Each structure stands twice: as C-alpha cells, then as structure tokens.
Image (cartoon, rainbow, N blue to C red):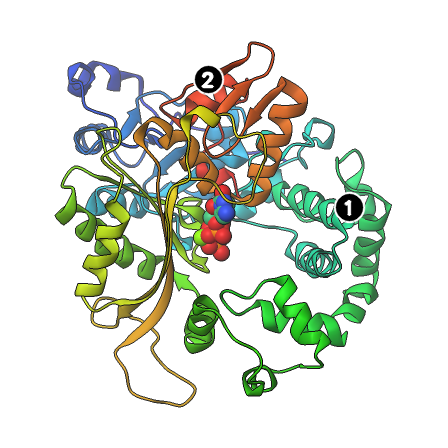
C-alpha cells in the first residue's frame, strides 16, 4: 500500500528554543516518560507544556526514544502518527501508550499520571495499529510473564475467560499441575498484541500444551468449550464458587459446607452448628457491596481518605496505591495501599492508629489487624508463603456517596448513603519498601514468574521482603523496583505492563 509522504512531526529548530533544558526538576513519577509530538501542537505550546510537566515532577523527553512510555499528540490523525512512529524503529512500539492531549491535561490537573481511559486514546489509532502490525513474533515470547509486557487490554478474553473457569475448577479439586498449566497459558494469551484466530497463530508460543489447545480449538470451532460448559453446570463447582465468593470463606470451608449438603447461603446460615468467624460475618453482612468491587474513581476517593488519615498521624508518611489499580485496572475487588515512613521503624504501630482514626471517622465496618512477624535475621525467607510478614490490615470501610458517585442501591431498596468496600493496608519498613511494592503490585502470575525466573535463571530467591543471591550468599538491597529488575538482569516492566 502506498502512503502519502510523512511529514516530520518534530521540527529541527525546536532544539534551539528549549529553555527548560537547563532547569533541573525532581522526578516524582519515574515510571512515566512522556514525549510530546510537536506537529499540530506547535513548538511554543510544546515547550510550555514540557516545562509545566517537568515542574510537576513528570519526566518529559525532547527526543523520541525507547525509554518513552507515553507519546502525547494533539490533533494528529491516527495514520500519520502511526507511520511516523513506525519510522523511529522503536522497540516494543505496540506496548507504548499513544494518547491524545486529554490524558496529559488530566494528569497535570491531578498532579500525577492518571490511568489511561478509552477517551484518552487517539480515535482509530488501534485499528491502524492492528492493520499494520505483524503478529508479534511468537518465537521471541518468553515463558516467563516477567519478560513479557501485558497491559490491561486483553485481545483473547474469549479464551482466557474459559481458562479461568478451568483454573478455578482445578483449584477446587486441588489439581495443582492443571491449575498452573492453565494459569500460564492464560498469561501468555493476555500478553498477545492481537486475537488468536486459528491454531496456527499459536505456533511457537510457550506454555500452550495439548490440553489448552484442545479447549481453544473447541472455542474456535463452536464459540464455546464443552469442557467449560460441563463445569459451569456442575453442582459442586457452582456451590464452591458461590461460597468462596464470600469474604473470609476459603476453599476448605466451602467444601465443608458443600459436604453437609448445602447449596445456598440460606441453608448455611440456617445451620446453628456452623459458627462463622468475624471475617465471614462481615463477608455475609456486606456480601452484595463487596461483590461489586470498586472502580477507579472510588479507589481515588479512598486514596484521599487513607492519605489524609495517615498524614494526621505521621505527616511525612508515604502512602502508595498498589495492587490492580497501580497496574491501571479500571475495577478491582479491593484497593491496596502500602504505608511506610521515611524514617526506618517509624511505621511500627502506624496501622493501629490508622484503624482508630477510621473508627473515629465512623467509616470502619470491619478490621483484621495482623502484627508484623518480620524478622530481619531470618532473611531470606526460605518458605515462599502466600502471605508476607509485614504488619497489615484487611478492612471493610464505608464509602460515602457524598464523596463520589457510589452505587449504594441495595436489593432490599433500603435507603443509605454509603457502600461497603474492601481495603488492604500493609506497612513495611522503608528499607524493604521496594520489595513490598513489587510484591503487592502483582499480578499474581507476574509475581509467580518473577520468583520462578529468579530461582531457575539466576539462582536467586525473591519474595516480598528481599532478594537473595544463592551463589554469592548475600541479600541484594534495593530502593526501587528498577533496582530489583536490574539485580535480576531483567528489562524493567512498568506496573501497567504487569497484568499477566
Ligand atoms: N499479594 C501478595 N500476598 C498476598 C496477597 C496478595 O503478595 N497474600 C499481592 C499479589 C497481588 C497484590 O498483592 C494485590 O492482591 P489482590 O488485591 O488480591 O489482587 P489485585 O491484583 O489487586 O486484584 P483486584 O483488582 O481484584 O484487587
Ligand atoms: Mg487489589
């Protein structure tokens, strides 16, 4: 196909007029590197916006390079932008965020990089990309999720949704091998830049074995998998799925209730011999609210509440949003925060005070406060437990509807001005912040593969506390996630590319 000549989108003379080059600003958001496209925007507006962003702690590059994560354009057509970007021969172009100016202005207004929403994207840019992108060369795809870039855009949802049922079913039946196989396959499919249209597309992809391919073949041929349909209508699967959807109810408890012959909540709650623990009581009490989860706007309001509360206790405490929302997800089942203090050790006891303040504000519905069992001398923690040893608390809070447009409707139509939401807080010492942040950012599959990669490829042990080099017999310290990736000899993967 012939294209019209592509005009340069950055004019050479700009360099001479870049007063900001000499001004040093503190970088607050190391994970974001912006490039502003000059064409249509104009050089003076570009330089004004560059200075504005830098003054707010954003990194803005004058030249387009591989380090750029967010390309921001104003009024450029999808086609001219795509062609121009192609010419630069950037690594991983499909993984870069190509955005219109609204993302930039929203971020400036918020004072931080906002999560990319559909309205921030360039109209028709993705179609342009899909027409032009060669399917990413499968041979190069790593078997480790920590060597792939996986955004929240999943082109293969039809397959991964089916796999998720199979994963859950395998989990209920304690079939670890099958569970792992489908989790790895799901993760590979999520990382692809396009939809799989036939089994040939899977040539050379890692982690896709015969059983996963058979399910995909079924879906490709009939639009659904008979195996998945069978599970979905299975009595035991349905009961365990229902029971484990209650906050505080794990597989074992669900199984016990199923064995007693129960299939509904009413049946469980009518049995006086079943004593629910505190967490399960809260789980039933706020079941519908918690099941709804939260959206980004609600998570932002909670961030403000938690930040404000924490800062009345320790003014310079550091509050960091983590978990799925840090990865750019629009919805989550909870909001996760890491709290720490610049002064080592000052975070001790902080969570207890936060809980008291939340109670005083009248928004604490439930809390499970776990003291730290963190022992520096025991590092590295040789057992890779699901839970880390930091002080943490699992909360249910009231999110008031006067703060954000909260869906407070209840099935019984009772009037109320709040909704119950799940919040997790974890408080590592600042010395271990980077490890805690990396661990709590997830996704779970990304974490699993980071640890597997460390162990098998680097002879290192990684967990939420530390990185241990078994060859050198030393713990490698790190202040940032970038340093941990560097210790592991891995290319840095930004949080929004960890949705493995
Ligand atoms: N995590 C961890 N140890 C745990 C639980 C979680 O290291 N015991 C990590 C993995 C992901 C991250 O913390 C947050 O956990 P979740 O909130 O369960 O996951 P999420 O990715 O935030 O998903 P959601 O959006 O549904 O909350
Ligand atoms: Mg979460």
Q: Is residue 430 visible?
A: yes
Q: Closest to the observer: 449 or 148? A: 449
Side of 488 relative to 409 (left or right): right
Side of 245 relative to 292 (left or right): right
Mark 2, ligand 1, within 8 Å: the answer is: no
Which of marks 2 and 1 precedes in the sequence? Answer: 1
Number of numbered discs: 2
Q: Position of residue 166 (x, y in %)?
A: 73, 58
39 lies above or below 355: above
Residue at (30% x, 36% y) in the render: 40
19 lies above or below 442: above
Res 236 → quadrant: bottom right
Numbered disc 2: secondary structure = strand
Mark 1 nearby-residue class (10 Å; few <14, some 14–19, many ≥20): few
Label 1–label 2 contact, CB within 8 A? no
Which residue is under mark 2?
A: 476
Q: Position of residue 482 (x, y in %)?
A: 42, 24
Which residue is under mark 1?
A: 177
Residue at (39% x, 48% y) in the render: 116
Q: Which mark is residue 35?
A: none
255 lies above or below 274: above
Q: Closest to the observer: 368 or 45? A: 368
Q: Position of residue 106 (x, y in %)?
A: 26, 48
Q: Closest to the observer: 65 or 313? A: 313
Res 192 → quadrant: top right
Side of 45 relative to 83 (left or right): left
């Amino acid at each position: 196909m012939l294209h019209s000549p592509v005009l340069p989108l950055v004019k050479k003379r700009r360099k001479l007029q870049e007063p900001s080059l000499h001004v040093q600003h503190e970088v607050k958001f190391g994970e974001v590197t912006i490039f502003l496209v000059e064409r249509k925007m104009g050089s003076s507006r570009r330089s004004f916006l560059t200075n504005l962003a830098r003054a707010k702690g954003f990194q803005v590059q004058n030249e387009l390079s591989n380090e750029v994560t967010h390309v921001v354009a104003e009024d450029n057509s999808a086609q001219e932008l795509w062609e121009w970007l192609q010419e630069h021969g950037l690594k991983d172009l499909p993984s870069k965020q190509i955005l219109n100016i609204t993302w930039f202005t929203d971020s400036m207004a918020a004072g931080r990089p906002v999560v990319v929403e559909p309205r921030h994207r360039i109209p028709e840019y993705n179609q342009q990309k899909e027409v032009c992108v060669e399917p990413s060369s499968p041979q190069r795809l790593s078997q480790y999720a920590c060597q792939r870039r996986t955004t929240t855009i999943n082109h293969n949802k039809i397959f991964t949704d089916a796999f998720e049922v199979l994963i859950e079913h395998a989990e209920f039946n304690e079939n670890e091998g099958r569970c792992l196989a489908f989790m790895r396959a799901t993760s590979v499919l999520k990382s692809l830049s396009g939809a799989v249209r036939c089994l040939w597309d899977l040539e050379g992809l890692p982690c896709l074995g015969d059983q996963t391919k058979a399910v995909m073949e079924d879906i490709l041929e009939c639009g659904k998998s008979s195996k998945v349909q069978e599970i979905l209508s299975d009595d035991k699967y349905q009961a365990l799925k229902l029971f484990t959807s209650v906050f505080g109810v794990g597989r074992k408890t669900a199984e016990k209730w199923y064995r007693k012959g129960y299939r509904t909540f009413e049946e469980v709650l009518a049995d006086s011999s079943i004593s629910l623990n505190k967490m399960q009581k809260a789980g039933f009490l706020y079941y519908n609210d918690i099941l709804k989860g939260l959206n980004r706007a609600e998570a932002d309001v909670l961030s403000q509440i938690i930040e404000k509360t924490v800062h009345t206790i320790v003014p310079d405490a550091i509050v960091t949003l983590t978990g799925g929302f840090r990865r750019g997800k629009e919805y989550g089942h909870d909001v996760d925060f890491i709290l720490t203090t610049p002064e080592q050790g000052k975070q001790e006891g902080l969570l207890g005070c936060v809980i008291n303040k939340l109670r005083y504000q009248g928004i604490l519905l439930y809390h499970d406060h776990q003291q730290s069992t963190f022992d520096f001398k025991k590092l590295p923690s040789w057992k890779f437990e699901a839970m880390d040893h930091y002080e943490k608390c699992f909360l249910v809070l009231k999110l008031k509807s006067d703060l954000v447009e909260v869906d407070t409707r209840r099935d019984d139509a009772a009037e109320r001005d709040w909704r119950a939401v799940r919040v997790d807080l974890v408080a590592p010492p600042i010395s271990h912040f980077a490890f805690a942040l990396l661990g709590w950012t997830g996704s779970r599959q990304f974490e699993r593969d980071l640890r597997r990669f460390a162990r098998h490829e680097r002879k290192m042990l990684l967990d939420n506390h530390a990185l241990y080099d078994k060859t050198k017999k030393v713990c490698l310290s790190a202040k940032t996630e970038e340093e941990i990736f560097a210790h592991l000899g891995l290319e840095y993967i930004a949080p929004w590319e960890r949705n493995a």
